[in-house]
Amino acid sequence: MVRLPVLLAASISLAAVTLAHAQTPPRQGGQQARTVPVLIASAVQKAMPVRFDTIGVVQPLASVVLRSRVESQVTDVLVADGATVKEGDVLVKLDQRTVEAQIKQAEAQLARSQAQLEQAQRDVRRFEQLIANDAGSRVNLDNSRTQMATLQAQIQSDQAALENLKVQLGFYTIRAPISGRIGVVAVKPGNIAKVAENSTPFATLIQISPIYVAFAVPQKLLVDLRGAMTDGTASVAATPQGATKAAIGKIAVIDNSVDNASGTITLRAMFENDNELLWPGALCNVRVTLRTEQNAIVVPREAVQTGQNGNFVFVVQDGVAKVRPVTLDRAIDGEAIIASGLKAGENVVTDGQLLLTDGARVEQKGGAPAPAAGQPAKGAS
């Protein structure tokens, strides 16, 4: 015998199922249509740069270690530590009294040789006159001419010795061989300047303007780099780490060989650096722009997905998302440049792809309908 409470519970359950079935809308084709909310953006055609980013190191075009070429006492240091100097500026003076005395001695020797030459020339002229009058000896004339030639050679030797001493006199005044910024001057007045290789240098002078930034790029970019340099379209922006302002320059040197170990080649870009933004030895964020592509197809980077068969996007047409394989050229500043597979004006999904399948119906998030093909979506980014 069935109990009354059990029969009552069964009746309630059957009524609930019947009510729920009545409230469920009929499915089309036996399937419940599901609409996925997504964000949509349009592919656009615009100019986009062809560029790459890397890290570089600032290097001076010239760096000179200032050393003495003679051994003498330092008398004057005419430059401050860290000062900017121009080519030819006097930096350090050494005690030059010894070489000045040697120059005076050489000048006196030259004057004596010149006086002796004048005497020999007079003797030659006198003996020539005597021979002409048949009153002199041929031997005396020949000896006089030999003496004159000897003194002429002696004068040349004295002049060379004097010029050598004057050159050495210049070694006692240290001048800036290039324009640039000097480091700490290590030798002060009163010290003895040494000429040994392990001696303490006066300072190091580094050229600041213009200046190099050296960086390495993959070998595969070499052809594009050389082409851009030939066409004059390449430019380089270097931003020192920690700075917000960039210096603009151009590629000046491509190294003559590729590093086999890393597969890269070293380049040097030159910058005028009049404001001294770039400092020798500093690390920089380097951006090399090779050229500008005028008619690139561009979509937001989020629109491009990666699957087993490569890159693809969801293209929205008449409220339906279709899978479209694409070829990605490059990505710049959050935008993807599409090499093939997409046309300007087509709408792509930028958010919500995880819930999509090929052929799924979509609508713009917020309740706006999905745009038709070739029309920009409302609120598209």
Image (cartoon, rainbow, N blue to C red):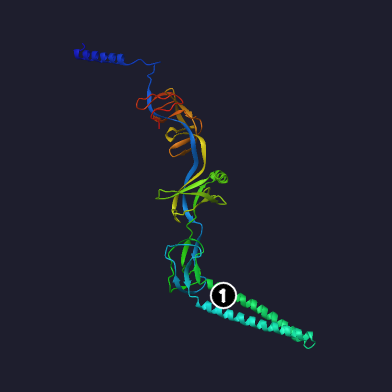
Whether residue 211 sits left or right of residue 155 in the image: it is left
Image vertical order of residue 119 relative to residue 340, above or below: below
Q: Is residue 297 above or below residue 29?
A: below
Residue 120 point in image, percent of width and height: 69, 83
Given residues 63 and 326, the one toward you in this image is 63
**Residue 261 visible in the displayed image:** no
Q: Position of residue 235 (x, y in %)?
A: 51, 46
Mark 1 closeness class: few <14, some 14–19, many ≥20 residues within 10 Å: some
Q: Measuring 57% from the left and 44% from the top, which residue is drawn there?
A: 231
Asked which quadrant contains residue 23, the reply is top left
Identity, as a three-letter code, of the amino acid under mark 1: Leu
Q: Quadrant of the C terminus?
A: top left
Left or right of 105: which side holds 332? left
Q: Is residue 37 at all visible to an observer of this figure?
A: yes
Using the image as rendered, state which of residue 277 and residue 222 is in the foreground: 277
* In-image side of 363 versus 167 (left or right): left
Local SS, label 1: helix
Which residue sits furthest bottom? 135
Q: Residue at x 62, y 76 (%)?
A: 159
381 w.r.t. 50: above or below: above
List x then y, in percent, for residue 21. Answer: 31, 15
Residue at (61% x, 75% y) in the render:
160
Q: Which residue is mark 1?
A: 165
Q: Nearer the viewer, residue 56 or 35?
A: 56
Residue, far right: 134
- Is residue 32 shown left or right of residue 121? left
From this view, report whether residue 34 is shown above or below residue 174. Answer: above
Look at 61% across and 79% down and name the residue there.
Answer: 110
The N terminus lies in quadrant: top left
